[in-house]
Each structure stands twice: as C-alpha cells, then as structure tokens.
Amino acid sequence: MSLIYKPIFSILLNALSLFLLLKFVPEITFTGGIWFFVIGGVILGLLNLFVRPFLKFLSLPLVFLTGGLFLIVINGFILWFLSYFMGVLNFYDVALVFPNFISYAIGAVVFGVINFATNLFFK
C-alpha cells in the first residue's frame, strides 16, 4: 500500500469502527453527522498510533497476569481519550457522549472486538 493510501485507509477503518460501535451500543451518542466520523477517525488513528502502544507497554505485566483482559481497560482509556479530545477540540459541534461507566465498559469490549475483526479482515 502506498504512503498516501495507508493513512486514508486507516481513517476509514477507524470511522467504520466508530460507526459499528455506535450501532452495537445504543446508549453511546454522538453529534456532528459525517464530520464526527471523519474527525473521530483521525483522532482515533492518532491515539492508536501514539497512545495505545505506550499504554500497552506500561501495562504489559497486567496484560500477562489477566490473560489479555486488561486490554479492555486500555480500550476504555482510548475511548475516554477520544471523547475527551472531541470535547476539548470542539470541531463543528462534534461530540461523543458516554452516559455512564457501564457504557464505557461495554463500548470497550465491543470496540476491541470490532478492532480485532477489522484488523483481521482488512490487514
């Protein structure tokens, strides 16, 4: 894949992951229409590129102790960072709203399964 198509493909996969997450977990809401998926895909791509490897490295002993279940916590942190950055940056009234902790937990599990499936299928 060329240097130009890889970031675009990554943004599209992240936008697809966000779309599927919102379809499977109905209590998570968003505003911003199509801009939500574009901006969310970019932010999620940057978080997956820079923050996720750092969190995985720091929590490596916990990931081994829990048999990989701690990755759900990392996915929850990534979703929280995404929601936080969308609120702070305030692009075109784009927002991602998690009403409670349970929606973060369910969203993290669903997001992990969706990421696993898209990475397995598309990469």
Image (cartoon, rainbow, N blue to C red):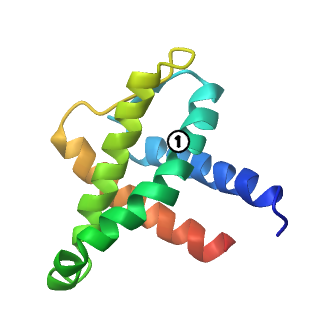
Tell me the quadrant of the picture where the N terminus can be found: bottom right
Q: Residue at 37% x, 34% y: name it.
A: 83
Check disc 1 and give the amino acid type. Ile
Residue 28 x, y percent position in the rendering = 35, 35
Q: Position of residue 87 (x, y in %)?
A: 39, 24
Q: Position of residue 77 (x, y in %)?
A: 29, 50
How many numbered markers are drawn? 1
Q: In this rendering, is residue 25 above or below 112?
A: above
In the picture, measured across the screen, residue 74 lies left or right of residue 88, that is left
Quadrant assignment, res 26:
top left
Q: Quadrant of the C terminus?
A: bottom right
Residue nearest the viewer, comparing 6 with 66: 6
Crowding at label 1, few (<14), some or many (≥20) Cα neighbours within 10 Å? many
Residue tagged by mark 1?
Answer: 43
**Direction from residue 44 to residue 109 in the image, left or right:** left
Q: Residue at x 57, y 15 (%)?
A: 92
Picture quadrant of residue 69:
bottom left
Q: Nearer the viewer, residue 122 or 24?
A: 122
Q: Is residue 118 above or below residue 13?
A: below
Say which residue appears at 47% left-offset and 18% top-offset. 90
Residue lying at 44% horizontally and 29% vertically, measured from the top left: 86
Residue 24 % position (x, y)? 42, 48
Q: Secondary structure at mark 1?
A: helix
Residue located farthest toward the top when viewing the structure as drawn: 93
Q: Is residue 73 toward the left or the right of residue 82 in the image?
A: left
Q: Is residue 40 left or right of residue 5?
A: left
